[in-house]
Amino acid sequence: MADYAWPPAGKRGLIGEEISRLDGPAKVSGRAKYTYDVNLPGMLYGKMVLSPYAHAKIVSIDTSAAEKMAGVKAVQVMKEPGQEVLWAGQEVVALAAETEDQAIDAARKVKVEYEPLPYLVTDAEPSAAGANARQFADQVDGNPDQGFAQAEVVHEGWYGSAVINHCCLESHGQVTHWEGESLIVHASTQNVSGMGGELARGLKVPAGNVTILTPVMGGGFGSKFGADTWGLACAQLSKKANRPVKMMLERDQEQIGAGSRPSMYAKVKVGAKKDGTLTAWSSESWGTAGPGPSGSPNLPYVVRPPDRKRRHTAVLTNTGPARAWRAPNHPQMCLITMAALEDLAADLQMDTLQFFLKNLSFTDRPDVYRAELEKAAELIEWKKKWHPRGDKTPGPIKRGLGLSIHTWGGAGHPSKCNCTIHPDGSVEVSLGSQDLGTGTRTVIAIVAAETLGLPLDAVKVNIGSSRYPPSGASGGSTTVGGVSSSTRRATTNALNELLAKVAPTLNVSPDQLEASGGRIQVKSDATKGMTWKQACAKLGTAPITALGERVAGARDELISGGVGGAQMAEVSVDLETGIVRMEKMVAVQDCGLIIDMKTAVSQVYGACIMGVGYALFEEKVMDQQTGRCLNADMEFYKLAGIGDIGELVVQMMTGPGYDERGVIGLGEPPVVSPGAAISNAVANAIGVRVPTLPITPDKVLAALEKGGRA
Amino acid sequence: MSKRDEPKEGKRGLGRREFVKLVSGTSAAVSTGVLTNVELLGAQTAAGGKTAGPGAVPMTLRINGQARQVTLEPRVTLLDALRESLDLTGAKKVCDRGTCGACTVIVNGKPIYSCTVLAIEAAMSGANIQTIEGLAPEGQFHTLSASFVQNDAQQCGFCTPGFVMAAKAYIDTHPNPTYEQVKHSLGGNLCRCGTYMGVRRAVVDAAMKMKGGKS
């Protein structure tokens, strides 16, 4: 009998190898059909009317002129008179027409009367936010006063990260159509198994009537969990018109209202002894998550001296609401902590790396961080290239090095997998999961093929439909843990049924058999056995189906949670223009047992590149004068381009000490540190701190002006 | 105090038609590797005397070697015509304003953002349009596409067909690109997942395999 435990090193055929993603050919050739690409016969196009005011009460809505416009087939009011809109861009009315342009024309004819109300769209200091500031209770650990009394050097500074967007390339949206009382939704979602129930509640139909389909999707990053107001409106329009409706957000809507990351700023005081040992931390932080309060960050991050206190104030603003953004709160907390610590190290005139190594006892996993920092230092040539604050070489181009460490949980979400072995030898595994571009589909196939001793292409992976056994939403790096555990269990269970069928033929007991190399064979004598196809033929006409489940919260020897990770950045900064250029970035990351090395490394590359974006370019710019977002497009909301990233080096920590922990998620951790590592590198280069991200040229020049040249 | 719907007029700022007109008029380059309509299609389309529309008009687009008849309003972009009327959905709609490159197709051998060209312009000029669907014959796989898969140059994949088409147009005229040249040639395409490392390798590897051939 086969058991669930992962095969040990040396017995793995596919796990840990570099395997190309299975949906790669369909995507690269343009054949993969994303939600945005779904075109159904008779399909209408939906558009929405958005509030032009940052805060207003709706007085009246008149859709009569719009209803008479050419091509209009249905109108759905999304906000009733008397209700408030809380940001400029909030959805008020939706309508559907024969063509997209007709829908746009008609939306312009909807008359909405508003009563404008006072608004705040900037996340200035809490003291300037008036009633929009919500202060949380102070959190105190140990004895901070005593800790600061013991400090021989104290650094005070302020640091922060601006609001940024998810900027998914496939905007939010869906194509909906009804078949009688059943609703079929092609949705760009991270939550195939969970989204239907939410829609069903809104539509007051049984949850079983709603099917969600997401074979591929164009990015989510934490912003695509819910059905959203437009999902409900689209289904309602479909119902009214009795036609399929496609309603995808336009780019400005996507940037304004479909996902932002909260800002976070903090005034920090941190103390250490002369030898670098941290003694105390104190911070007063604030930030905005839009109209709702942002959570209180757990500062300091990763490196936590026992004597510390913190206070947080949420600033409520009339901006599009925040959504989970890859590693929620971690990049912001990381920047505040690592920048303050690096400034303190500079005050102490210590090598930053030595300072961090000295304080690893204040982290949860000192040995992992030590190994990772040492590896990163080797890869970026820290000893050779690091210099004290301020590059003293002549000329306007200054180079600097910075580092940061981070953490994330991972573990696994609940997941069920159904494995079917057909009498003809073909195999299917089915899960109500989704592949956001992370490689989930490929990981499932690898686990199934490894378990059954088959080549990768012998397994058909069915995901992206709510008709398959439910899996959790893809968030918080929990997917790979969830689906690899349930797939391993389902395929092992199915295999054991097959082994039991075949064993009598071979005159052995099932526990003496194994599946390997496309055969079912006796473990002690591989010549005794039969091909997979021959074995499956013994099933007669009845396929085997077996379920495997990763149970929420249960102890699971196949997976773990909790990783480290260290990153180092090398930048050059032009003192005359303020432009920061990425030279090199090294990311060293552990994530337990790696299933597919190729897609794992791609995750880390991608995280570093996203990190370069939020460190140097990205900011959602709001205008208090008009209450509007000034850069709801991709021209002035700047993503990093292919020429902006410098050289990237990724080192995955694998082997003894890592592999036996089982599978751990990887999506979030590597995106946490880039901002802090890059900010520290800039400070090391120019000799002064640029306090906030993104580090744009104007901020570099302002910091130099204020702090003096290096 | 109550205002009736006032700020909504012109809320989108410059409309697409104004944008196209402006670009055509000034011949300003928009971004790396992108041509204006005047350079691409010939000045006669911008300065043409006949008026079409505003209703739908029949037109013929030359796409992947085939003449395709469509009836569209003159304001419909080439991108929307491809995606919504011809179900050629490989070119993606992302920024819809000539920034991100996800809608890149090859017109008369040059990469263009199909969201910045009107379908009627492409039809009137008789432009030869190649989309990602026409990159390889049915059932075959282009060397460049294979190289993207091999080098994991895609994650969510939404930007990928645009990258492939931009890279194809570049390799056709620069058969031995360096990493540095690839960075410049693909500066007009944006990816959110962060696949640039794979893209660089994929393009250079593919060019070596293609040995300058147009396969």
Image (cartoon, coloured by chain):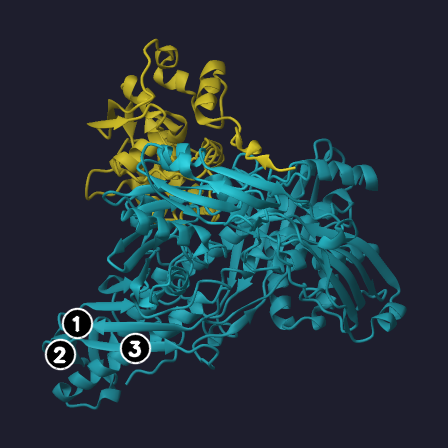
Mark drawn on residue A396: none
Report x, y in % for residue A681. 69, 48
Kindly identify the amino acid type of the residue bearing the numbered disc 1: His
- Mark 3, other Cα within 10 Å: few <14 / some 14–19 / many ≥20: many
Under tag 3, what secondary structure? strand
Chain letter for the residue marked with disc 2 in the picture: A
Per the image, label 2 sits on a secondary structure element best described as: loop
| Residue assigned mark 1 | A422
Letter of the chain that mark 3 sits on in the rendering: A
Q: Is residue A685 above or below residue B13?
A: below
Residue that label 2 marks: A539
Image location (x, y in percent) of residue A670 = 55, 58
Comes first in the chain, label 3 or label 1: 1
- Mark 1, Cα crowd under 10 Å, few <14 / some 14-19 / many 20+, is some
Image position of A84 (left or right of A433): right
- Residue A636 falls in image quadrant: top right
Whether residue B108 can be seen here: no
Indicate the quadrant containing the C terminus of chain A: top left, top right, bottom left or bottom right.
Answer: top right
Q: Nearer the viewer, residue B118 or B203?
A: B118
Image colour for chain B is yellow
Task: Please name the amino acid that badge 2 sits on.
Answer: Leu
Is B100 located above or below residue A79 in the figure?
above
The residue closer to the viewer here, B88 or A494, is: B88
Q: Report the Cα–Cα distance between label 2 and label 1.
A: 8 Å
- Which image quadrant for residue A540? bottom left
Residue at left 47%, top 26%? B15
Residue at 32% x, 70% y: name it.
A469
Numbered circle sitting on residue A547: 3
Question: Which mark's residue is nearer the viewer, 2 or 3?
Answer: 3
The CA distance from mark 3 to mark 1 is 15 Å
Q: Secondary structure at mark 1?
A: loop
